[in-house]
Structures are given as C-alpha cells and as structure tokens.
Image: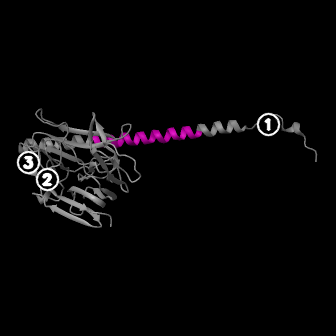
Amino acid sequence: MNINIDSFKGRNGFSLVELLVVVTLIVVLTGTAIWGLSSIRNFGVDSKVRADLVAIANAIEAFERDQNSYPIPALGGTTPVLCFYADATYAHDCVDAYFVQSYVDRSLLPQKCLSVIPLDPRTGSRYVYGVSTDSHSFQIAGVGMDGGATAYTTENLSSDLLLPSLIRAYDSANMVVDGGIYLPYSPNHLVLSGTLHDVTGTVTNGGGTPYTEGAQVFEGDQIITGADGLVDLYLSDGSIVQMEPNSDMNLSRLAVNQNDENGTVTNVLLKLNLGKIWSKVVRLSQNSEFRVETTNSIAGCAAPSFPSTLKVICWLAVEKYG
C-alpha cells in the first residue's frame, strides 16, 4: 500500500503541548468559578449571621427597656447555663459567678421582644449569649468565614467590665479570633477536643513526643506524665481534667452527639491506665455522658452546690496497670 505523506501536510490539529495548555486553562477557570460561587455563598451566609446578631441585640435592648435589666438565663431550666468567675474560669457555685453563658432561645427572649428565634445558618445551632450577673453587659456571637473562620460579635459592654469577652462555651481546636481575643465558638459545631495548659515537667504522647503549652489533643490521643509531670486538660465542653505525676490516660471518646436548637449532647470516655486525675465535669445537657474507665481504681466525687449547673467534681486514682 502506498501512502501519500504530502496529503497530510497543512491539516489542522493540536500538539500535545497545546492540549495540555487547554486542559490547564479549563481546570483553572473551573476552579476560579467554583471559588467565586463559594465566596458568594459565604458572603450571603455571613450577611445572614450579622443580621441575626443585630436582630438579637435589638431584642435584648428592648427587653432591657421593659425590665430595666438584660435577660439572665434561668438556672435549672432545659437550656444549659455555664457560670464563670471574674477571671473567666468555670464556677461551680453560681452564686459567686461574675457572668453566665447560655443560648438565645425562647426561654431567654419572649415573643414580644423577638418574634422568631434565629439559628446559625451554617450549623442550625443556637447563637451563644453571655451576660454579666449584674446585668450591665451582654454579648452574643456567631461565626463568619471571611478568609477563614472569624468571630462575629455584637455586644454592649459596660466600662467597668473586667473582661473583654463574656463568651467562654467552647475551647476547641477550631477557635475563631475577634480582635486578638480567642472566642471559644467553633464553626464546626460537632467538634469536641482538648487543649493542654499548665504543662510542667515531662508530658508526652503515646509515642514519647513531648507536649507543649497549648497543644491540641483529640479522640484517640494518649497523655503520659513523668515523675515530674503535671498538666491540665481543658475539654471543649468546659470540663477540666488535672493529671498528676506518673499518670497515663487515653482519650478514648470525645464526641458531640447533638448540637442544634434542641440542645448540646456530648459523650466523653477517658481511660485512666495509671496514676491520678482530678476532673471538673460540665454536662451541657442531661443526656451528656462523662465516663472514666479504670482497671484498679479509687474514686471520689463531690456533688456541686447547684445541681442545675450540671457539674460534678471527681478524683480518680489507679495504682497500677491491670
């Protein structure tokens, strides 16, 4: 068979390099379009969050004009209430609390002040509300996505307030920042994690890598203290676990089973293999669980002064491995 090569001369076609350039351009343009649509969507949701915070703040101010004080969440109700001292640490005795924190729901604001209670458009959970116990200051918070998670707050803080913020509900790995202040409110409402504070001496993970101040820990991690080791584990539900020297603990479960307008349900399981721990437990709802498994333990628990705050203090010691 004879093939006339000259017949192929002058035919139009694409080289491999040209095809790669075209494909690259298509990928870039597609990515740009998707990013643009995502930015537009985030802008719309962020605008809704800001509008919700303004509406809630206006309703709180209307409540104040009618009652001569900002609304203070009721203890013992179905909505969890957390209490804090003037240094922003958790208070188990709410009588001496400097401020309290809860959620914006119908138990907080009557319908005449706010006809519809808005929910976070990203998570469907309620907005967080903090108020000083003297009822002179309040703050509400939501999360935006301006180039990453960003805290949106609306507040009326009195000049004599000792703290820059009245919101301390969560302290997770996804903290958001507002003006340099870390607000413990996460855009991922199903994240439960821990932060290590007051790290002293030898504190390592299961592989022997040292932990440092502020290290984040998650479900499945292990914390081991040496003979000179001390560490405080702050969980994102507000609970605190203090580990003493020569202790070994696994974070077997750090779960958020529910976090929406109906409440927050957490599930914590710690396995204490060796040593001693003190735990100050915060249960964000009656259905929340906080358990410590041991093989050979001595335990002591103290009921809180106010059962409605849903907090318990426990001490556990394990003499040796099982």
Give the residue pinned by disc 2: 92
Q: Earlier in the sequence, mark 1 or mark 3?
A: 1
Q: Which structural element holds mark 3?
A: helix
**In the rendering, at what x and y percent does residue 94 appear?**
10, 51
Disc ID at residue 312: none
Cβ–Cβ below 8 Å for labels 1 and 2?
no
Say what amino acid the circle numbered 1 marks. Answer: Arg
Give the residue pinned by disc 3: 96
The magenta segment: 26-50
C-alpha gap between disc 1 and disc 2? 84 Å
C-alpha gap between disc 1 and disc 3? 88 Å
Tell me the crowding category of disc 2: few under 14, some 14 to 19, or many 20 or more residues within 10 angstroms, Cα based: many
Front position among marks 1 and 3: 3
Magenta includes 179?
no
Front position among marks 1 and 2: 2
Q: Specify the principal SS of the magenta part.
A: helix
Comparing 124 with 129, the one in front is: 129
Q: Residue at the far front: name it.
A: 227
